[in-house]
């Protein structure tokens, strides 16, 4: 395989700094996850974000706190006695989100280190990106399900099952990100194949 040009010193430094930032992201993910679990741990008065069905409410948003008619699609409520299923979702949601972000930060850090070492067009690097796409897909899928469970469960608990809320807006950003990451992985794999074929002609 032809030798890949090594990044210059400034580029390597930037990549190492980015990898270090990813490590900080891992720590931040752990802190956020633990903080949320500490909120859930008591089992009562748990703050939960819930999706509402465009409820009309009056809020003090005008001059000097004057009331303003608004429409609310989401709110945070305190759940005092969640059901078993809701409790499970409340515990699982931050864990899944935390694991997803930690996994993505690990992939980002390793990817930057491989770039710094000019290990770009390799099968391992492509598989690393496929792994990142898989982590994001799983986290997005299971996270969406758990978020829906916590929202519906919280509304059911505080309304005794009499209120059916709306649904959180689904963002296309994760799907686009998965597509981009997988596309880059495919491009690297094709590049690795072309390099092997080129090396065979030399």
Image (cartoon, rainbow, N blue to C red):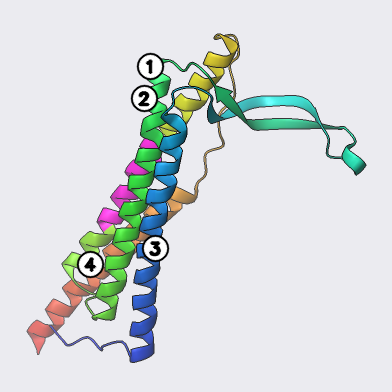
Eye-nearest disc, 1 or 4? 1
The vertical placement of 68 against 44, above or below, is below
Tell me the tag on residue 125.
4
Give SS at disc 1: helix
> In the shown orientation, is residue 184 left or right of residue 163?
left
User: Which residue extends farthest front?
Assistant: 42
Look at the image and give the residue range highlighted in magenta: 130-143
Q: Quadrant of the C terminus?
A: bottom left
Give SS at disc 2: helix
C-alpha separation, residue under disc 4 versus residue under disc 2: 36 Å
Q: List x then y, in percent, for residue 173.
A: 49, 50
Tell me the tag on residue 113.
none
For the residues bearing labels 2 and 1, Cβ distance under 8 angstroms = yes
C-alpha separation, residue under disc 3 versus residue under disc 1: 34 Å
Q: Residue at label 2?
A: 88
Q: Residue at label 3?
A: 24
C-alpha separation, residue under disc 2 versus residue under disc 3: 29 Å
Closest to the observer, 125 or 180: 125
For marks 1 and 4, the one nearer the N-term is 1
* Magenta residue check for 138: yes
Give SS at disc 3: helix
Name the residue located 29 percent from the left edge and 49 percent from the top edge. 134
Q: List x then y, in percent, for residue 157.
A: 52, 15
Name the residue located 91 percent from the left edge and 42 percent from the top edge. 64
Eye-nearest disc, 4 or 2? 2
> In the shown orientation, is residue 170 left or right of residue 118?
right
Give SS at disc 4: helix
Q: Residue at label 1?
A: 84
């Amino acid at each position: 395989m032809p030798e890949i040009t090594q990044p210059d010193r400034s580029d390597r430094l930037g990549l190492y700094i980015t990898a270090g930032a990813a490590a900080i992201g891992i720590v931040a993910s752990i802190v956020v996850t633990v903080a949320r679990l500490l909120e859930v741990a008591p089992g009562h008065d748990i703050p939960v974000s819930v999706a509402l069905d465009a409820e009309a409410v009056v809020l003090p948003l005008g001059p000097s706190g004057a009331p303003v008619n608004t429409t609310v699609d989401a709110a945070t409520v305190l759940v005092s006695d969640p059901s078993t299923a809701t409790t499970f979702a409340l515990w699982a949601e931050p864990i899944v989100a935390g694991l997803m972000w930690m996994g993505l930060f690990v992939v980002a850090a390793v990817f930057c280190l491989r770039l710094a070492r000019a290990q770009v067009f390799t099968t391992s690097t492509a598989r690393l990106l496929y792994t990142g796409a898989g982590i994001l897909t799983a986290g997005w899928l299971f996270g969406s399900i758990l978020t829906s469970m916590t929202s519906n469960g919280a509304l059911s608990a505080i309304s005794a099952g009499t209120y059916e809320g709306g649904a959180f807006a689904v963002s296309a950003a994760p799907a686009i990100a998965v597509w981009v990451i997988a596309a880059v992985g495919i491009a690297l794999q094709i590049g690795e194949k072309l390099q092997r074929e080129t090396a065979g002609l030399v």
